[in-house]
Amino acid sequence: MAVSWRSWLANEGVKHLCLLIWLSLNVLFFWKTFLLYNQGPEYHYLHQMLGLGLCLSRASASVLNLNCSLILLPMCRTLLAYLRGSQKVPSRRTRRLLDKSRTFHITCGVTICIFSGVHVAAHLVNALNFSVNYNDEFVELNAARYRNEDPRKLLFTTVPGLTGVCMVLVLFLMITASTYAIRVSNYDIFWYTHNLFFVFYMLLMLHVSGDDWKPYKLRRLYFIWVCRDIQSFRWFADLLCVLHNKFWQENRPDYVNIQLYLSQTDGIQKIIGEKYQALNSRLFIGRPRWKLLFDEIAKCNRGKTVGVFCCGPSSISKTLHKLSNRSNSYGTRFEYNKESFS
């Protein structure tokens, strides 16, 4: 039997449109939040510490917040009765959607269960990474108090962890009591456990207020120095080490990205030592790969303006000037400046 599209649209069109809007909102919230914590410069250090677990925990939290704010609306009987008996919703097709309120309530509930699983799993990974990747330079950023701290302490001794565990227990009781077998055999159990939503929402407010993810804005100064021999670095090495230590103490370890390039290797061992330990890993042989460096800076500063300052021979100046004028896929604009003492 052929399906009449006009009849299908009349009977099912509005329902599927609303479902599409709801699904699109879920996808949008998840993806935008995922990208924010994956690529946002203000969460650069936190992402370095937690990795994918950070992105999944925050993205799933956005979906959970959306559905927790919607799940009660279909069950507000007074509101539904008012809409049915008034002219606030003049369209009969739209009013028929009110009969699907229970279905939407269940859909939101299933979504909450699924993304709660994702959220819990991601936070378990986060707790482990906080413990394993603990660093003295990130005291304010790290939830752990010391390296290899038992991750279970983060789950049961912090406000977000403890409230999260309690919310999972409450959600488990509500879901199991909502099964068809329990509803049919003992409706009172279903009714009373479902009223635990008061407790769930109180825990949710505590959980959200206690879940403080500190953003650290990534603003980086790239200091690139190319010299022929190692002695040229020595007079400036002490100041570079002081700057490096200063920013690490301020929880801004990458504020100054130091890269030293040496074209001759004679005497390179003279700068390697405890005094210049901070510069050892920043000393390279050869010349900078300017194009890769510009691409990295553009990626970390999407849509922003980056200043380029050059003081050196004309060959390097021409290269940097050309790269500054080159377009990139990140919308980053480079402003070139040159200083010459010759």
Image (cartoon, helix red, strand yellow):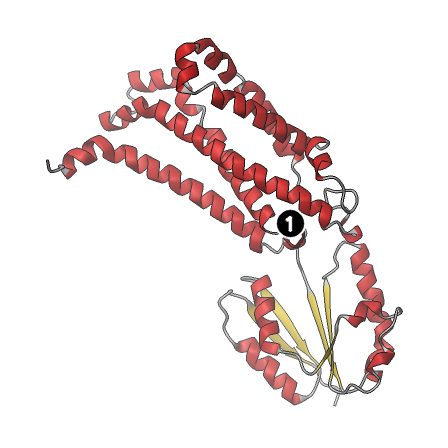
* Residue furthest out toward the bottom: 342
x and y percentages locating residue 152 in the rendered image: 70, 35
Q: For the point 82% across and 79% down, which residue is it?
A: 233
Q: For the point 29% across and 16% down, which residue is it?
A: 85
Is 128 left or right of 86, judged from the image as shown?
Answer: right
Count numbered badges in the picture: 1
Q: Mark 1 sits on what residue?
A: 50
Q: Is residue 15 above or below residue 278?
A: above
Q: Which image quadrant is residue 323 in?
A: bottom right
Is 175 left or right of 43, judged from the image as shown?
Answer: left
Q: Is residue 328 above or below residue 170?
A: below
x and y percentages locating residue 163 in the rendered image: 64, 28
Q: Which image quadrant is residue 58 in?
A: top right
Is 26 left or right of 319, judged from the image as shown?
Answer: left
Question: Which amino acid type is marked by label 1?
Answer: Leu
- Quadrant where the C terminus sits is bottom right
x and y percentages locating residue 190 in the rendered image: 46, 14
Q: Is residue 282 above or below residue 313?
A: above
Per the image, label 1 sits on a secondary structure element best described as helix
Q: Is residue 127 above or below residue 328?
A: above
> Is residue 148 or residue 37 the one in the foreground?
148
Question: For mark 1, does the 10 Å Cα neighbourhood hold few (<14), some (14 to 19), or many (20 or more) residues?
Answer: many
- Quadrant where the N terminus sits is top left
Q: For the point 23% across and 33% down, which residue is it?
A: 12
Q: For the point 55% across and 19% down, which residue is it?
A: 198
